Image (cartoon, helix red, strand yellow):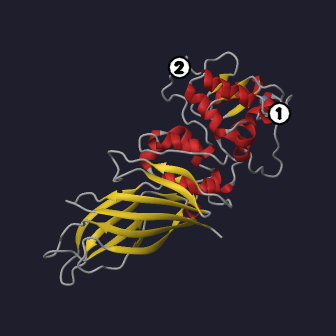
Amino acid sequence: MSNRYHEYSKSNSANRYHEYSLQSGGKSNRYYEYNKSTSGSCKKLKEMLTKSDNQVCADCDAPDPKWASANIGVFLCLKCCSVHRNLGTEISKVLSVTLDEWSEEDIDSMVEVGGNSSANAIYEAYFPDGISKPKPNASIEERTKFIRSKYELQEFLKPSLRMVSSKSSFRSCVSSDFSSFTVQPHQKNAADASRSIGTLKVKVVRGIDLAIRDFRSSDPYVILMLGQQKVQTSVIQSNLNPVWNEELKLPIPQRFGALKLQVFDHDTFSADDIMGEAEIDLQPFMAAATAFGDDEMSFDMQVGKWLKSSDNALIKDSTINIVGGKIKQEIHLKLQNVECGELELELEWIPLQ
Ligand SMILES: [Zn+2]
């Protein structure tokens, strides 16, 4: 699971998010392109099957599984496969290892997960007392109960992965699999939802070519807003290219939306004038934070990306990296609803102690 690499964009962030959730491929009804020239990929699939963890069913340990869930990334026996099929393709996209033709995307999705032990490390991270896996000869009822709990209700994820977002656009594009991922029965009350899951440290680095609001310059400062929380930088006098390098902290609740920012010109005698604003989609960052935030990562690597698109304020793709054991994201924004101005920020994740 260490070489996971995920890209996010507005258009497919939901899918990709689910992908993060278990590095599984998101919705099965995403475009499905058969590709005859997938011999290289097929080879990868066959190689995966030779690994010992993939030689038993991911759900019941029956030997020699001939089926797979391409989006979840597990190999399955025929009995478990039929339960998966009943979950619906938005939860599990079942394919025969030997009979079906696999798209390159499906194979990549399997390879990315890494197979049964990698997937189970997350889907079976934590069994409550009294729960255990079904045996190969388990009844259909027992098998169904387990498989639904494991993938549909996702009851055995490690607690830090049970994350909730309130972002509506995000939810709407994958209502089915995303909600199955997020809506955990024990998290439904509001107290749980507002409890902090960690802290976001935002370093407001600098502004570039900001708008003029006073006679020749501006006295800019930046406000960050997350839900009801609001923090702000100091005012820098008469500077259109201010360097703040100021760190602001915001606790992240279970349910969080976009991080909003506004730049203002400080006026002593009148109301402050706005100098632009922008929204930061925290999903890619939080996906990385929940996947890697608890771990002791001793090497640097890229773990995600928020992609520039026509409906966000990014000037360039924003990568999420593990640097010196910390999850960080550099963001370069073009301020919106203003004639000019850019802002550079750095996000850093501070996990709960
Ligand atoms: Zn099975």
The CA span between labels 1 and 2 is 30 Å
Does any portion of residue 283 appear in the rendered image?
yes
What percent of the width, then of the height, locates residue 78?
76, 23
**Mark 2: few/some/many CA within 10 Å (<14, 14-19, 20+):** few
Depth check: give the residue in front, 318 or 144. Answer: 318
Q: Is residue 245 above or below residue 122?
A: below
Does any portion of residue 196 appear in the rendered image?
no
- Residue at 74 percent across and 37 percent down: it is 116
Depth check: give the residue in front, 328 or 195. Answer: 328
Q: Label 2's element?
A: loop
Residue that extends furthest to the left in the rendered view of this protein: 215
Image depth: mark 1 or mark 2 in front? 2
Q: Classify the position of the C terminus by image quarter.
A: bottom right
Q: Amino acid at mark 2?
A: Tyr
269 relative to 325 in the view: left or right: left
Q: Would you say the beta carbon of the disc 1 residue lies within 8 angstroms of ligand 1?
A: yes
230 relative to 111 in the view: left or right: left
100 relative to 57 in the view: left or right: left
Q: Label 1's element?
A: loop
Q: Ligand 1 falls in which quarter?
A: top right
Q: Which residue is mark 1?
A: 61
Q: Would you say the beta carbon of the disc 2 residue lies within 8 angstroms of ligand 1?
A: no
- Residue at 49 percent across and 30 percent down: it is 30
Q: Which residue is mark 2?
A: 34
What percent of the width, then of the height, locates residue 282?
47, 56
Q: Is residue 35 above or below residue 318?
A: above
Upstream in the sequence, badge 1 or badge 2?
2
Q: Amino acid at mark 1?
A: Asp
Q: Is residue 158 above or below residue 352?
A: above
Label 1 close to label 2 by CB (< 8 Å):
no
